[in-house]
Image (cartoon, helix red, strand yellow):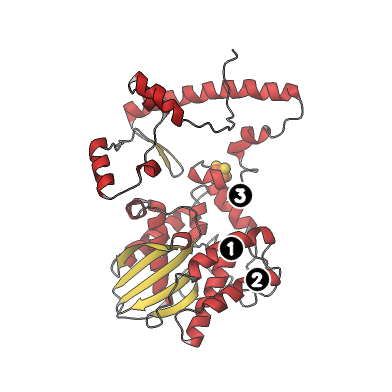
């Protein structure tokens, strides 16, 4: 039997084996998926719950939308104290963005919160079975002719460009794995395509990748190979990567000991010691960066976790301002709203013009935290 059980998000954690093992050992018990009456939600889980119940309600009554019901549903959560008052505003904003634009296609709808739990032989078992090996929940599935359409709701504050979505390995991994597990949820020999997407609720926009049925065997091979590597791990080393910034186990991480040691300032002496330490560490950091850059120039990229230190090619964009003005004028764009003049750019103008421009200057007070030389 496998040492661990997996899911898409669980697999992502294993990029750092220390974190993967910690998550496996401390994972919270599943909540009762049938009875949410007493469940206290965070914003993301509350949104997913509302979306599932709302869509199932629409299917039951055979309608594409039901705005009044959607409004009642979110209010019910607050009445039942299942969402805190602080979280309610954000939830309400998200929920409104969803239900005011959502129209359910009843002809293609298949199911919501589609769950599957597989054993090592990739046979379906009970959700909580002891021999469960890989589990997945897909937020919503539609079937359109010979195509499965997968939707995973995302409550992120940013929307990736479609080109980024297509190139980014993290998005691709999720789309691939969801496409793979959907084959265990739907038994339909006519399926030829799987469109696996993420719906960014705040932006009412979906980003997706499409796979053919022939891609599925390749994806399964990749998932099982990765799991085999994890199963064969002998040491569970902490490998820093992009996930360090939002790691739940940072306080136990052996790589972060030095960072943890400095947490509190209780006296002026400690404050001064920390200030000195920052100067020393920043100098050290810049030396490390410069040494690493030199190494990479000679020997090529260096990897840690999912990060790659390399000399990357960049491309900067610049606009031909005469053409810009011509286009903006043609489209009757209010120039005052889009053009930005910095003081550095203004100083490059004729001195007399610069002086005249001072009439248009306003000042906005603010603060900035940094070390500057004493006068
Ligand atoms: S902080 Fe980074 S290196 Fe440490 S356990 Fe978390 S992911 Fe791993």
Which quarter of the figure has residue 79? bottom right
Viewer can see residue 133: no
Which residue lies under the disc numbered 1? 91
Residue at screen point 45% across, 66% down: 152
| Label 3 beta carbon within 8 A of ligand 1 | yes
Asked whether, in this view, residue 45 is left or right of residue 59, the answer is: right
Task: State if disc 1 and disc 2 touch (CB < 8 Å).
Answer: yes
Q: How far apart are marks 3 and 1 (CA)?
A: 23 Å
Choose the circle earlier in sequence order: 2 or 1: 2
**Where is residue 203 drawn, in percent x and y?**
44, 60
Q: Which labelled disc corresponds to residue 77?
A: 2
| Label 2 beta carbon within 8 A of ligand 1 | no
- State whether residue 265 is above or below residue 355: below
**Front position in the image: 213 or 75:** 75
Mark 3 closeness class: few <14, some 14–19, many ≥20 residues within 10 Å: few
Which quarter of the figure has residue 320? top left
Choose the circle earlier in sequence order: 3 or 1: 1
Q: Distance between the residues labelled 2 and 1?
A: 10 Å
Q: Nearer the viewer, mark 3 or mark 2?
A: 2
Q: Ligand 1 falls in which quarter?
A: top right
**Where is residue 227 drawn, in percent x and y?**
46, 58
Viewer can see residue 319: yes
Choose the circle earlier in sequence order: 3 or 2: 2
Q: Which of marks 3 and 1 is in front?
A: 1
Q: Distance between the residues labelled 3 and 2?
A: 28 Å
Question: Quadrant of the image for the C terminus?
Answer: top right
Residue at screen point 35% across, 74% down: 148
What element does badge 1 sit on? helix
Asked whether, in this view, residue 366 is left or right of residue 273, the answer is: left
């Amino acid at each position: 039997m496998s040492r661990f059980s997996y899911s898409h998000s669980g697999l992502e954690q294993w990029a750092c084996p220390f974190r993967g093992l910690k998550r496996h050992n401390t994972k919270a018990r599943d909540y009762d998926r049938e009875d949410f009456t007493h469940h206290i939600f965070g914003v993301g889980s509350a949104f997913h719950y509302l979306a599932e119940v709302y869509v199932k309600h629409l299917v039951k009554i055979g309608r594409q939308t039901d705005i009044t019901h959607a409004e009642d549903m979110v209010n019910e959560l607050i009445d039942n104290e299942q969402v805190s008052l602080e979280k309610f505003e954000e939830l309400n904003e998200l929920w409104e963005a969803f239900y005011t634009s959502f129209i359910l296609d009843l002809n293609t709808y298949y199911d919501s919160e589609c769950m599957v739990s597989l054993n090592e032989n990739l046979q379906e078992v009970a959700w909580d079975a002891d021999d469960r090996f890989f589990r997945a929940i897909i937020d919503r599935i539609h079937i359109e002719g010979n195509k499965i359409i997968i939707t995973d709701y995302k409550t992120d504050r940013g929307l990736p460009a479609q080109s980024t979505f297509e190139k980014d390995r993290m998005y691709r991994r999720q789309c691939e794995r969801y496409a793979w597990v959907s084959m265990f949820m739907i038994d339909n020999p006519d399926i030829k395509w799987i469109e696996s997407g993420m719906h960014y609720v705040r932006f009412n926009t979906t980003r997706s990748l499409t796979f053919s049925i022939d891609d599925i065997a390749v994806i399964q091979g990749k998932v099982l190979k990765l799991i085999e590597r994890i199963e064969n791990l002998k040491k569970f080393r902490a490998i820093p990567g992009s996930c360090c910034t939002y790691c739940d186990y940072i306080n136990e991480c052996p790589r972060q000991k030095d960072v943890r040691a400095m947490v509190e300032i209780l006296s002026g002496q400690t404050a001064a010691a920390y200030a000195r330490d920052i100067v020393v560490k920043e100098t050290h950091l810049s030396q490390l960066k410069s040494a690493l850059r030199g190494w990479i120039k000679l020997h090529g990229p260096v990897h840690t976790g999912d990060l790659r230190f390399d000399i990357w090619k960049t491309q900067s964009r610049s606009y031909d301002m005469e053409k810009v003005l011509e286009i903006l004028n043609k489209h009757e764009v209010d120039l005052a709203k889009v053009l930005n003049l910095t003081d550095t750019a203004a100083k490059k103008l004729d001195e007399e013009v610069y002086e005249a421009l001072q009439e248009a200057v306003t000042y906005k007070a603010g603060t900035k935290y940094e070390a500057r030389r004493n006068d």
